[in-house]
Amino acid sequence: MEDGGAHAPHLLLPAARLRLLSGDYELARAIASRGAARTGSSRRDARQLLLLKAVATSRTGDRDGAVRAATSAMRVRPGDEVLSLASLSPEDRETVLGLVPNALTAEAAGRLAEARPVLPGRVHLVELTARERAVLTELAKGGSVPDIALRLVVSVNTVRTQTQSVYRKLGVSSRGEAVMRASELGLL
């Protein structure tokens, strides 16, 4: 998903959301902008993308751009619809509603206030290269570093370097921790 779903338009919304949740606001804004501008996007996706664009733009410090995106999102939203806003974190809802005063009726605001967060406030994206994934898979199988190097047809130093990179990206310091964390994240 490094390219933000450029070759898979249906992935633009989740790609933008993941980038926003991981703190990559510039990329989140770029992906959301591209998705919102697509003529083939559903109205629901367009609303979500505009909301994500508003939040990401606000977090980059561009208040005017954020107001434009939030206003556009509110414009394509049916009157009392709050589901699109409910998919945002409470903090992000406040951001959007602060950008567009009087965007909700009292009834809609009440329904939105009762909505529980459906997504985490932050995520830690772990993006491994193909070679790092191969090393991780081999680490999970067991064997020594020289054995792994032999199986992957690379040098021992290359395996050590890639192992350290995997550990750093996973936030761990041992093979066992790496395998456990990778399993938790669905990387194995």
Image (cartoon, rainbow, N blue to C red):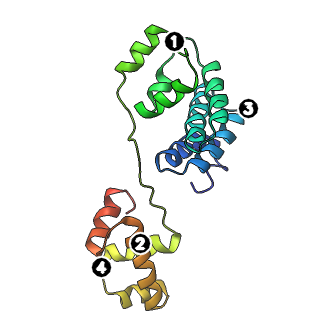
**Residue drawn at the location 43% of the way across and 33% of the way down:** 91
Pointers 4 and 1 in contact (CB under 8 A)?
Answer: no
Q: Which mark is residue 166?
A: 2
Q: How many numbered marks does the figure carry?
A: 4
The residue nearer to you, when weighing 43 against 53, is 53
Q: Is residue 139 above or below residue 125?
A: below
Q: Which residue is mark 1?
A: 80
Among the two numbered marks 2 and 1 on one chain, the one whose residue lies closer to the N terminus: 1
Q: CA distance from mark 4 to mark 3?
A: 50 Å
The residue nearer to you, when weighing 100 against 34, is 100
What's the amino acid at mark 3? Thr
**Residue drawn at the location 64% of the way across and 19% of the way down:** 75
Q: Which residue is mark 3?
A: 39
**Residue drawn at the location 40% of the way across and 41% of the way down:** 121
Q: Residues within 10 Å of mark 4 (few under 14, many from 20)?
A: few
The N terminus lies in which quarter of the figure?
bottom right
